[in-house]
Image (cartoon, rainbow, N blue to C red):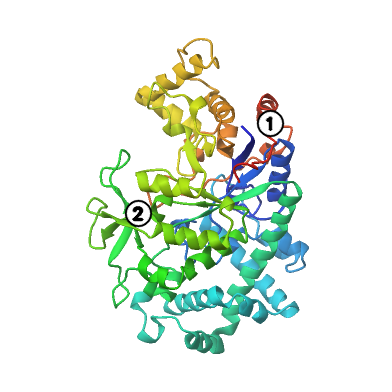
Amino acid sequence: MKSAGILMHISSLPTEFGIGDLGQTAYRFADLLHEHGQKYWQILPLNWCGYSNSPYNPISAFATFPYLISPELLFEDGLVSSSELDAARLPNSAEVDYISVYQAKDALFTTAVECWLQRTGIEDYIESNSSDLKPFLAYVTLCEIYGNDDWYHWLGEHRTYSAALYDRLWHKYSRRMSYYAVLQAIFEDQFHRLHQYLRSLDIKLIGDLPLYCSYQSADVWANQQLFDLDDEGKRRTVAGVPPDAFSETGQLWGNPTFRWDVMQNDGFDWWLRRIGNALKYNDLLRLDHFIGYVNYWSIDASEETAVNGRWIPAPAEIFFAALFSRYDRSRFIAEDLGILNAEVCRIRDKYALPGMIILQFCFDNPAVDPDQYPEDRIIYTGTHDNDTIMGWYRHLIESGAAEANIIHEYLQRSHRIDTLPTDPLTDVNWHLIDIAYASPCHLAIVPFQDILGLGTEARINTPGIPLGNWHWRLIDETYLNTSHYKWNEMLKLNLRYNNLSITLTNLF
């Protein structure tokens, strides 16, 4: 083991404003990581969340989520008053109440944007980011005009993007379009300040890039030729995954699939710009659903489940050659979970992309031996798509699953416990964290909930369930105290595996 990190999305940090943000607690969390030998902070996508508040279903592949902007930093920068700051405070809650957050911050943003415009203006910023920002500004403006985001039902003159359309909208709605542009500028400024602080602590930020775009997004509307749509903008095929052990009917995501052949014609320009934009904010980038870059499950849009789809090859070799001719491949991680075939593994290994091992998936075989895991993998106790260790383990115990006995037997075989337990282990989270740290994998990432030993109530996402996710946040700020006993346990592990502070020269 050579390095370690924590998975904790910014929205889950504790603040007085209903949602985690880029302010004081983010800096405190960075200090916490630094003081306990953590070299990586992994977050979720930063894109503007769409349906169900999911960062994996954003309304833009480029625009960032402004509700992560820190009200405290707005005050420190003189963009809002102390009374306006106080008015944005919300009752402390263990869940993000998105409606309340949107209402409170929208009121605050109105003042901050006006102050920004009086000081700086925004047209130069728009022009310097015009290729991706202008379509987004046009899209959100039209969504407000029509009162919905079903762009395929808009009038013909608004059904497709053009520079002329942008100019017409700007002539009439420049103040509103400036509002959205300023929010992007403020987010970028606050985020880059935090990122610079992380670099001063020698902490690298791992971001995440969703594969697909939401149907109701600026990108699909403005680039319809890149997606499998008919002449009226309706989806012909949609994305998902086939049936597996977790779902008899698979997962029907509904995102329009890509026209990889069309994308290839211009050298994957949209993709390269999108990835470059994400790398602007992150040191490393996890390519979510990596399998989809090699072959993807395509389902007819008329289907009600994902059962009757088919695998379609993507031009992986050509795409990755283009990608790595522009960006250093050492900055990418392959989320190689789920159904893998030989070609997916070959592409991953050809470009030496580190894949992922999830410990929760490893205890269905009595012969499990984490000591034999490959060095060039990143090992996780779980991800944002898993239950917490404690929630997962309790479910195994309550359901009488064989995996619980396999865990116990492995812990005894590896001398982590003396005898097979007669009762559930109260510290099983620490045992699995220890297993991850002790494995040969060069990097171990642990969700913050697993360090705290929280149960299913702290789960952030359940795949296949579209609503009710992305709400969890840390309510108890004492956990951000570096002397908290939970962090002392992490320090003990760092001392046991005292080479954790070595950088990943060989891997990244």
- Tell me where residue 186 appears, x and y as whole percent: 67, 67
The answer to whether one can see residue 51 in this image is no
Residue 336 is left or right of residue 276, and the answer is left
Q: Is 100 situated above or below 363?
A: below
Query: Residue 295 has which mark?
Result: 2
Report crowding for label 1: few under 14, some 14 to 19, many 20 or more residues within 10 A (C-alpha).
few
Q: Is 358 situated above or below 17?
A: above
- Which residue is labeled 1 in the image? 499
* Count of marks overlaid on the render: 2
Which of the 4 quarters of the picture holds residue 57? bottom left
Q: Amino acid at mark 1?
A: Asn
- Tell me where residue 375 appears, x and y as whole percent: 54, 35
- Tell me where residue 370 appears, x and y as whole percent: 49, 27
Report crowding for label 2: few under 14, some 14 to 19, many 20 or more residues within 10 A (C-alpha).
some
Q: If the image is split into quadrants, where does the N terminus sit?
A: top right
Instruction: Compute the Cα span from label 2 to label 1.
Output: 38 Å
Q: Is 89 situated above or below 486?
A: below
**Mark 2 element type:** strand
Residue 304 is left or right of residue 22, and the answer is left
Q: Amino acid at mark 2?
A: Asn
